[in-house]
């Protein structure tokens, strides 16, 4: 048997690359290295702007040339860094040497020693991770998540009046509308979106153990905490003033917890849609040429929602593990976070893949109103709640002396199929006011939806 050429171990980098590849712009080794170069370059500019150690501010053209190194970062740079790291055996040191080479190329050797000045590797890494995760969330994950919410919201409005039989504990229950049920998910997912959008991305820039020790020895008169704060904030991050060697990763635990929460609500959505398909409430729209089963030609399997379930579970497994692992670092630093953080993209990738499946799945279903109507018509006993509630109100109002209305309706309906004629006869014989009786006689399972339609406006 011949050996295969190099193959991706993760389906995210193989089978599903087209759905999640955009995350690689940020949550890949190359994306991380580009962010590291970005931080190193901006730190050089920040120092020269302040004239540290007799340096002169860079000209506008020199700054533009340095920033162009980041903007043009590509395959040749990725390869060069890989070659450097093969020698240094240290990823951030390789980035430092890479930046020094670019300074030499630009005739800026005079400021070479300001490269990585007073920095521990984690000063660069924590800011780089914060930048890449922030950009991945804002530019890739959140737009896809919002698209699913918007699609659901449109379906909720479209089906706001589509009466359906509810099922609590899997049993026929008080009717609702499909629009209202989808609106519940829109509301839940929107709350989480707002929380994710409000997330803080923290950064530290304070040296080997968070004490500014080397900084103070080199320049005792500089207000280093203020310099640190200004630099971190200039990168669009929130400054963390109190850390060990590492930024404590609490913001990551918070964010990944929110994404995992979103995954679980989406999982609930996927299982509900799957169940509605199973019940026939949603028809699946066959794709031309697609095969639903290798042996049963009639089948159209709800694979979009099944795939989403699996990927949401995988995503939460990774993100939950990261959230639990990253908040602990022995004493002033250990390296457990190093390998862990390299899997951030895996956690987001499976979530993004699930979002893609859900979005596509929602576009491949159609509500079957005839199935909803038949389901309602077969379950008139659900009106028992309405009848016993109206009787209670009539008793309180002095228009009825019926004892224990609940027990009365329980005896009539529990575990039984009761048709329209039987319920009408039962209501007609009740000792209640005429207006209440006429209201109940006019009621059907299809019209017994309360203000479900209006509740969609809460979106």
Image: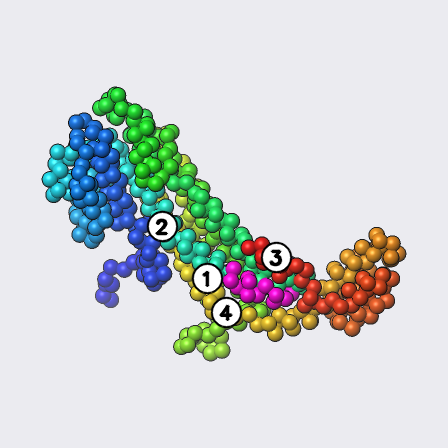
Structural crowding at the residue carrying mark 3, measured as other residues with C-alpha within 10 Å and reported as few (<14), some (14–19) or many (≥20): some
Residue holding disc 1: 358
Residue 455 got which mark?
A: 3
Q: Earlier in the sequence, mark 3 or mark 4?
A: 4
Residue 365 got which mark?
A: 4
The quadrant holding residue 140 is bottom left
> In whole angstroms, how far apart are the C-alphas of marks 2 and 4?
30 Å
Start-end of magenta stretch: 153-169
> In whole angstroms, how far apart are the C-alphas of marks 2 and 3?
34 Å
Q: Earlier in the sequence, mark 2 or mark 3?
A: 2
Residue 313: x percent and y percent? 46, 54
Is residue 201 found left or right of 411 in the rendered image?
Answer: left
Q: Tell me if I can see residue 66 in this picture.
A: no
Instruction: Say whether marks 2 and 4 touch (CB < 8 Å).
Output: no
Seen as rendered, the residue at the extreme bottom is 297
Seen as rendered, the residue at the extreme front is 60
Residue holding disc 2: 136
The quadrant holding residue 288 is bottom left
């Amino acid at each position: 048997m011949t050996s295969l050429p190099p193959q991706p171990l993760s389906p995210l980098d193989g089978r599903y690359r087209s759905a999640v590849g955009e995350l690689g712009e940020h949550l890949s080794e190359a994306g991380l290295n580009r962010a590291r170069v970005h931080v190193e370059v901006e730190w050089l500019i920040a120092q020269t702007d302040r004239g540290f150690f007799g340096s002169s501010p860079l000209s506008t053209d020199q700054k533009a040339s340095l920033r162009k190194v980041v903007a043009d970062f590509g395959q040749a740079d990725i390869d060069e860094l890989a070659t450097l790291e093969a020698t240094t055996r240290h990823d951030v040191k390789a980035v430092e040497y890479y930046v020094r080479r670019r300074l030499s190329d630009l005739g800026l050797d005079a400021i070479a020693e300001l490269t990585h000045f007073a920095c521990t590797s984690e000063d660069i890494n924590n800011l780089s991770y914060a930048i890449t995760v922030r950009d991945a969330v804002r530019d890739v994950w959140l737009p896809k998540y919002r698209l699913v919410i918007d699609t659901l919201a449109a379906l909720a409005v479209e089906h706001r009046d589509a009466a359906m039989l509810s099922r609590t504990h899997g049993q026929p229950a008080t009717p609702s509308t499909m629009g209202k049920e989808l609106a519940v998910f829109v509301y839940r997912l929107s709350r989480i979106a707002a929380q994710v959008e409000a997330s803080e991305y923290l950064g530290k820039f304070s040296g080997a153990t968070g004490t500014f020790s080397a900084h103070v020895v080199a320049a005792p008169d500089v207000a280093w905490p203020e310099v640190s704060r200004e630099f971190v904030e200039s990168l669009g991050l929130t400054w963390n003033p109190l850390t060990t060697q590492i930024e404590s990763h609490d913001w990551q635990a918070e964010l990944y917890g929110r994404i995992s929460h979103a995954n679980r609500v989406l999982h609930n959505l996927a299982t509900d849609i799957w169940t509605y398909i199973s019940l026939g409430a949603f028809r699946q729209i066959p794709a031309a040429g697609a095969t639903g089963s290798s042996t049963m030609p009639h089948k159209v399997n709800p694979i979009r929602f099944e795939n989403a379930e699996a990927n949401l579970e995988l995503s939460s497994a990774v993100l939950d593990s990261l959230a639990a692992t990253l908040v602990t670092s022995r004493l002033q630093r250990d390296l457990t976070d190093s390998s862990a953080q390299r899997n951030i993209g895996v956690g987001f990738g499976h979530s993004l893949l699930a979002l893609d499946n859900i979005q596509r799945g929602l576009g491949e279903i159609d509500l079957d109103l005839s199935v909803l109507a038949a389901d309602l018509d077969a379950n008139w006993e659900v009106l028992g709640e309405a009848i016993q509630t109206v009787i209670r109100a009539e008793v309180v109002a002095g228009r009825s002396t019926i004892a224990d209305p609940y027990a009365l309706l329980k005896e009539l309906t529990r575990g039984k199929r009761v048709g329209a004629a039987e319920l009408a006869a039962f209501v007609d014989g009740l000792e209640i006011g005429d207006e209440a009786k006429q209201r109940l006689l006019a009621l059907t399972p299809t019209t017994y939806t309360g203000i479900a339609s209006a509740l969609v406006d809460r979106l």
